[in-house]
Amino acid sequence: EVQLLDSGGGLVQPGGSLRLSCVASGFSISTNYMSWVRQAPGRGLEWVSLLYSGGSTYYADSVKGRFTISRDDSRDTLYLQMNSLGAEDTAVYFCAGSLTRYYFEYWGQGTLVTVSS
Amino acid sequence: EIVLTQSPATLSLSPGERATLSCRASQTVSSSYVAWYQQKPGQAPRLLIYAASSRATGVPDRFSGSGSGTDFTLTISRMEPGDFAVYYCQQYGASPRVFPFGGGTKVEIK
């Protein structure tokens, strides 16, 4: 059974940083496609970032230059380093994995990031 | 960049009724790149349909997807109590590499 466990969310001040983690079991993050998708309170879904098995990375324009996606294959863990956070980044962040790059098959339970002073 | 518009925003139905949800793209997209998700309150989204018409593993056959070009449809043949949720369409964009979602359709109990 595939399980993705998100963690690392919390309250952070504007301009601050946070690192999210997603531990995978039953699913190889090193040979598949891994993404982060977020959902602001009461809003729809927004794709944030994608990491290819080969290491290529892609970002939504809204986070480019501020967020970095990475992984530690030895720990089966995906990360999202978030810097220069603003109120607009307040959301539940989901990690998602897939055998293809076209859609998101498996999802974590989400971790809430709140940016507020 | 492709924009996905879902309609209606809210659909009020009774159990047993048929649900028809629309997703319209701002430009022609490949059917291979269209997916649908179901999300219940407090839960992560669940993949229902990929490549416009293929059901994901474990998805009941009352869910079906169709469409091509700019117009895609998710149909639930007979609503069951557990089907009342928000549904999102999503598309894969190759250049630039983006994954736009539609704004969602909430299917509520009438």
Image (spheres, rainbow, N blue to C red):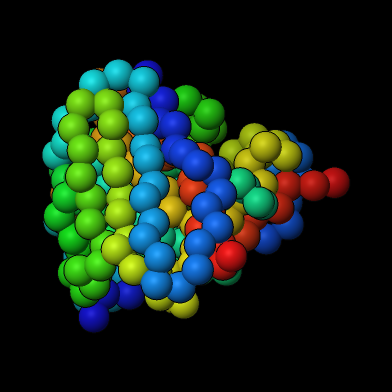
Q: Is residue B101 above or below residue A71?
A: above
Q: Is residue A86 left or right of residue B78?
A: right
Say how many tags the image has.
0
Residue visible at 36% across and 60% down in the picture: B18
Q: Which residue is found at the position 66% from the left and 47% from the top?
A: A90
Residue toward you, B102 or A112: B102
Q: Is residue B47 above or below residue B20?
A: below
Nearer to the camera, B105 or B3: B105
Inspect this view and state whether residue B10 appears. Answer: yes
Task: Work out which residue is located at the far right of the displayed protein and give it.
Answer: A117
Q: Provide residue B39's location: percent of width, then percent of height.
A: 46, 61
Q: Quadrant of the N terminus of chain A?
A: bottom left
- Which residue is pictured at 63% across the width and 41% down the height? A89
Which quadrant of the figure has residue B66? top left
- Percent position of residue A44, x then y: 54, 46
Residue A110 pos. (x, y %): 51, 63
For the point 53% across and 29% down, which residue is it? A62
Question: In screen coordinates, is B94 left or right of A80?
Answer: left
In this orientation, which residue lies closer to the viewer: B55 or B96? B55
- A74 over A3 or under it: above or below: above
**Residue B24: which quarter of the image?**
top left
Q: Residue furthest bottom?
A: A1
Q: Is residue A97 visible?
A: no
Whether residue B28 is situated above or below residue A39 in the rendered picture: above
Q: Nearer the viewer, residue A37 or B47?
A: B47
